[in-house]
């Protein structure tokens, strides 16, 4: 039986005829502009893209692992901004892959999509393979427990090259308990971590998405430039790093398997 909870749709954005929204049970999941892959509709996607833009000189091809595919917004963006980048997308839901493949523009051959569980895929990867790992992993609006532990993050770190960067989308609501735990978890593995979000979220005034960036080398994150990009966004953001992040995460303990 076709249950409403499993319903997937691609609908046209009435405000932008070339825009397509991926809905799951009526909830917005992803957005793609069929004519302009550089157009990024969602605030958190723009924040992830801004960090990706700063990960290497403009136009440089990178090796990228995407955990969670949706409508493949960021793979399309990176294919446009960094041509020739080898990208692997892991998506657990074959129905999403089938719909997006059928209804949206084809991907370049450098982008591969595989149906798999994110943790299983990361565990099977070889070491020091990727420049970027981007995680946007949700089931029924919740990040699965097995991809938010120290053990999983350590596996992600293993797959990154020495200058590699890990980006995570976190959905949370005040008082941002899940985000604080996730930051503490990443800090247990990575020496350089920052948090990027709408200022209202950091003040506990709204529900939404936050982005955590983590780097395998101390001092790797270009925090001042990330902050400048966050301030310029149409939804101005802030960046917590160093002492400010210490204060934010105080009292939170990393999550572990089991």
Image (tube, rainbow, N blue to C red):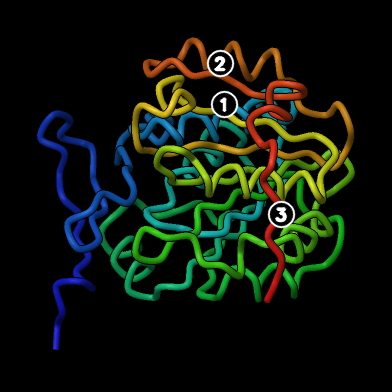
Q: Residues within 10 Å of mark 1 (few under 14, many from 20)?
A: some
Q: Quadrant of the N terminus?
A: bottom left
Q: What residue is rendered at 54% in x and 18% in y? A: 238
Mark 3: few, some, or many residues within 10 Å (few <14, many ≥20)? some
From mark 2 to mark 1, how far is it between C-alphas?
A: 7 Å
Where residue 202 sits: x, y (%)? 49, 26
Q: Residue furthest left?
A: 14
The CA span between labels 3 and 2 is 29 Å
Tell me, for residue 254, which label it has, or none.
Answer: 3
Could you tell me how many numbered marks the image carries?
3
From this view, report whether residue 171 is shown above or below residue 106: above
The circle drawn on residue 50 is 1
Q: Which residue is mark 2?
A: 229
Query: Which label was assigned to residue 69?
Result: none
State if disc 1 and disc 2 touch (CB < 8 Å): yes
Task: Return the residue nearer the eye: 256 or 24.
Answer: 256
């Amino acid at each position: 039986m076709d249950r409403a909870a499993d319903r997937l749709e691609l609908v046209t954005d009435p405000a932008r005829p070339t825009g397509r929204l991926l809905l799951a049970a009526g909830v917005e999941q992803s957005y793609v502009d069929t004519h302009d892959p550089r157009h990024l509709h969602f605030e958190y996607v723009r924040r992830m893209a801004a960090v990706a833009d700063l990960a290497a000189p403009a136009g440089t091809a990178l090796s990228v692992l995407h955990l969670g595919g949706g409508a493949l917004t960021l793979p399309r963006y990176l294919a446009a901004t960094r041509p020739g980048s080898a990208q692997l997308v892991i998506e657990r839901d074959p129905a999403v892959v089938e719909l997006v493949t059928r209804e949206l523009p084809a991907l370049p051959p450098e982008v591969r999509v595989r149906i798999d569980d994110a943790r299983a895929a990361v565990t099977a990867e070889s070491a020091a393979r990727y420049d970027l790992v981007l995680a946007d992993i949700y089931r029924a609006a919740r990040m699965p427990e097995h991809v938010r532990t120290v053990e999983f993050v350590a596996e992600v770190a293993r797959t990154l090259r020495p200058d590699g960067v890990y980006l995570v989308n976190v959905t949370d609501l005040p008082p941002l308990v899940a985000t604080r735990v996730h930051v503490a978890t990443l800090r247990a593995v990575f020496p350089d971590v920052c948090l990027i979000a709408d200022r209202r979220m950091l003040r506990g005034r709204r529900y939404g998405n936050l982005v955590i960036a983590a780097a395998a080398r101390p001092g790797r994150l270009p925090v001042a430039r990330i902050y400048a990009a966050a301030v310029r966004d149409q939804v101005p953001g802030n960046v917590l790093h160093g002492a400010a992040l210490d204060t934010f995460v105080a009292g939170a303990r990393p999550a572990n398997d089991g």
